[in-house]
Amino acid sequence: MCRIALAWPQACVSAYYVAYSENQQSPRFDSTIPARMQELQRYQT
């Protein structure tokens, strides 16, 4: 049951990332993904 409940949010996040990868310059996107990528790179070192 938990897997079914989590499938929809996971699909939404995946779709967001796919749409972002196709056109990063679209005005529909805010700085969420670039900020998260920078944060991950900071913690990588």
Image (cartoon, rainbow, N blue to C red):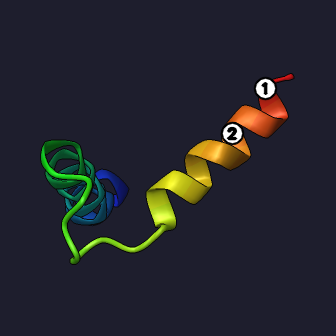
Q: Residue furthest front?
A: 25
Q: Which residue is mark 2?
A: 40
Kindly identify the residue that appears in the image at 71 percent across and 48 percent down: 39
* Left or right: 25, with 44 as reference point: left
Amino acid marked by disc 1: Gln
Q: Which residue is mark 1?
A: 44
Q: In this view of the protein, which residue sits in the foreground, 5 or 11?
A: 11
Q: Give the x, y percent position of residue 22.
A: 13, 44
Quadrant of image for the N terminus: bottom left
| Helix, strand or loop at mark 2 | helix
* Tag 2–tag 1 contact (CB < 8 Å): yes
Is the residue 33 above or below the residue 38 in the image?
below
Q: Give the x, y percent position of residue 26.
A: 19, 66
Amino acid marked by disc 2: Leu
Disc on res. 10: none
Q: Give the x, y percent position of residue 25.
A: 24, 59
Residue 2 found in image quarter: bottom left
Q: Residue furthest top?
A: 45
Q: Residue furthest right?
A: 45
Is the residue 2 above or below the residue 45 in the image?
below
Is the residue 26 above or below the residue 28 in the image?
above
| Helix, strand or loop at mark 1 | helix
Kindly identify the residue that appears in the image at 51 percent across and 53 percent down: 34
Q: In this view of the protein, which residue sits in the foreground, 37 or 16?
A: 37
Mark 1 nearby-residue class (10 Å; few <14, some 14–19, many ≥20): few
